[in-house]
Image (cartoon, rainbow, N blue to C red):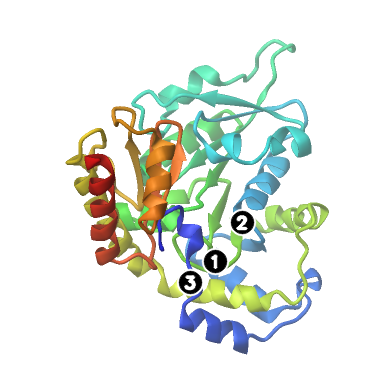
Amino acid sequence: MIDLRSDTVTRPTPAMRKAMADAEVGDDVYSEDPTVNSLQERAAEIFGREAALFVPTGSMGNQVAVKLHTKPGDEIVIEERGHIFNYEMGTPAVVSGVIVRPVKSSDGSGMLTWTDIEPALHVDQPYYSCPTGLICLENSHNLAGGSVMTAAECRMICENAHSRGIPVHMDGARIFNASAALGTSVRDLTGECDSVQFCLSKGLGAPVGSVLVGSREFIAEARVWRKRLGGGMRQVGVLAAAGLVALEESPPKLADDHANAKTLAEGLAELPGLSIDPEKVVTNIVIVDASAADLSSQEIVEALKEKGVLAIGFGSAIRMVTHFDVSSDDIAKSIAAFREILAK
């Protein structure tokens, strides 16, 4: 099967498997796992932060950050298609007691500007307004088709937010994809944010895990909340070892994934009933509108599966994500599968 459902479906590389087998381990709840400690130190170094924390999932990393930056009754401002709002099961309300104020990006890119954000803020408002406690950004933006935010755009938001006493968290699940697309280091892309979560198990291809980075004080408290949420792990160096390999070896490979995504988008743009602008595909996510096709998106997805291609339907659209287990030949076969299905 050619699996384009997500970049989370990758298998560990031989180098990752060897590192996992050879990993030196200890009890991470006591901060005694040397491989986990090495991963955290390396992540902090790459992002130019004081400290980092290895967490089981990106959702946990995001929700720990939301908890630490806010207090019950606050609002968090986020783009309306943001992962924290749409795919983390209402956890900001359940765990942190905050509500989400979704904001539409004015240009449709999924990337908020300060002009988009400012009208949604509640700062020094009457007491009956929920105060804005946090702004959450996402780079690259999943549901917006992998769009990216530049360092300058992020810096402008952070500077304005901080001048009003509002922290900024970056959901950087695929921040390394944004880095590869923009030719800008992850450190520069996130430097002004108060905290950043990034996934090892998406574009970077590790089997498990994400990392939360921030100040030393912030990460110390994050460790407490990781434990409260059930994320305290023991001899987890066997997983952190794969993360270390992913962190060092995978970023240079992301350009190939992006090239494959562009090729896929260009091929689909030529097919009847499908609509996509290949110029807007800049990372590894391809979302094609199938509303004009004779078949529904779900019918197309089912037909693709019969031809050995896995994708995901999102309403009238279909999402596909390239990764290092997908070759250029796989892309050609996937386009051919679409062509056969739509021709019928």
Q: Position of residue 269 (x, y in %)?
A: 21, 40
> What is the crowding at mark 3: few (fewer than 14 residues within 10 Å), some, or many (at least 20)?
many
Q: Position of residue 224 (x, y in %)?
A: 80, 56
- Depth check, front residue: 128 or 2: 2
Comes first in the chain, label 3 or label 2: 2
Looking at the image, residue 50 lies above or below residue 66 = below
- Depth check, front residue: 63 or 9: 9
- Residue at the outermost left position: 270
Q: Is residue 84 left or right of residue 113?
A: right
Total numbered circles: 3
Amino acid type at circle 1 is Ala
Say what secondary structure mark 3 lies in: helix
Q: Is residue 155 left or right of residue 125?
A: left
Question: Marks 2 and 3: in contact by CB < 8 Å?
Answer: no
> What is the crowding at mark 1: few (fewer than 14 residues within 10 Å), some, or many (at least 20)?
many
Q: Quadrant of residue 148?
A: top left
Residue 276 visible? The answer is yes
The numbered disc on residue 246 is 3
> What is the crowding at mark 2: few (fewer than 14 residues within 10 Å), some, or many (at least 20)?
many
Q: Residue at x 20, y 40 (%)?
A: 271
Which-is-in-front pick, marks 1 and 3? 3
- Residue at the outermost front position: 344
Comes first in the chain, label 1 or label 3: 1
The numbered disc on residue 43 is 1
- Residue at the outermost bottom position: 22
Q: CA distance from mark 1 to mark 3?
A: 11 Å
Comes first in the chain, label 2 or label 1: 1
